[in-house]
Image (cartoon, helix red, strand yellow):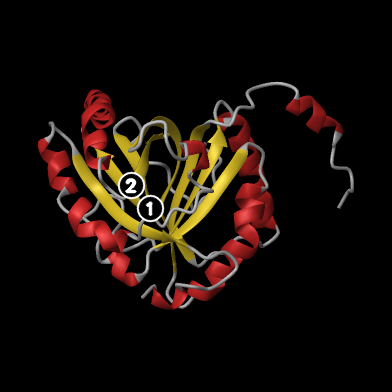
Amino acid sequence: MSDDTRSDLYAELASTGPYGVRPGHALITMVEPHPGHEYAYNRWYEDDHYYAGAMAMPWMFAGRRWVATRDLQLLRSPEKSAVAQPVTAGCYLSVYWITEGRYDDHMRWTVAINRRLNRDARVYRDRTHVFTAFQDHAATVYRDGAAGPRDVHALDHPYAGLVLEVIDTDTPEQCAGLLEWLRARHLPARLAGSPAALVTVFRPTPLPGDRMTYVKQVEGVGTRLTLLWFLERDPRESWEEHFTGLDTEIAVSGPGRRVELLAPFVPTVPGTDTHVSALR
């Protein structure tokens, strides 16, 4: 292998284009290790892939892993989900922020590096991508206004839990109406007095045609919203009070709106196998 890293190009690339800190885009990926591979998958992801396949890439500036133990999986709804079949599938969730305006640049790098990792046998095969999508930021709603961490801090702040909510609509027009209703009415009301400090809302974008074959094309482009609720308490402590019935509220709020996944997670403990024994 050549030692030439073409480092002269790095100064050129860094001198142009957007370089703010706003999370303009995200990678949200929920994965299920195959039975019997839970420990090996966790070590591969934490020890290698989290860095080589994500954080070491240009313009991906924050990341965090989350896990759903079996008791958390059993809190999910709806029973028949368009996202996860069965609804308990996908016990690990990884979320990454990407610099606004750098999605295309990042995608060119990530496709290339994943091809290289695949060629070098550094891709773990015994896993299923249940829900993997690059997404564009649509809104952030805060419980406490200007007080507290901003969305740029959300993956570094020590939040105690995260809830992934995926809402589908029938048409792009319904999706636009849903976004405005969430931003102006539903989320401010739901956040008030809740353990959630903020909610980020994203819209999925299609994956490039040269994506890895084990990652399926993104569904719901133009008709789906992905919400991330960042919690200051373990979701088990507040699930019944703050999240039970949320899907019904969405459904009656307007035509074509339906929650296809409501799933709680807690943060992993990096460098350890904490929680792995409780996945099944």
Q: Looking at the image, can residue 243 be seen?
A: no
Q: Is there CB contact under 8 Å for labels 2 and 1?
A: yes
- x, y percentage for residue 6? 85, 37
> Furthest-right residue in view?
3
Query: Does residue 174 appear left or right of residue 106 in this picture?
Result: left
Query: Does residue 221 appear left or right of residue 212 in this picture?
Result: left
- Establish if 148 lies above or below 100: below
Q: Who is closer to the viewer here, 270 or 252?
A: 270
What residue would you read off at disc 1?
A: 232
**Within-10-Å neighbours for mark 1: few <14, some 14–19, many 20+:** some
Instruction: Give the amino acid type for the residue marked by disc 2 in the picture.
Output: Ala
Element class at badge 1: loop
Q: To which quarter of the image does residue 123 belong? A: bottom right
**Residue 196's disc number:** 2
Residue drawn at x 27%, y 47% as measured from the top left: 194
Element class at badge 2: strand
Residue drawn at x 24%, y 53% as measured from the top left: 81
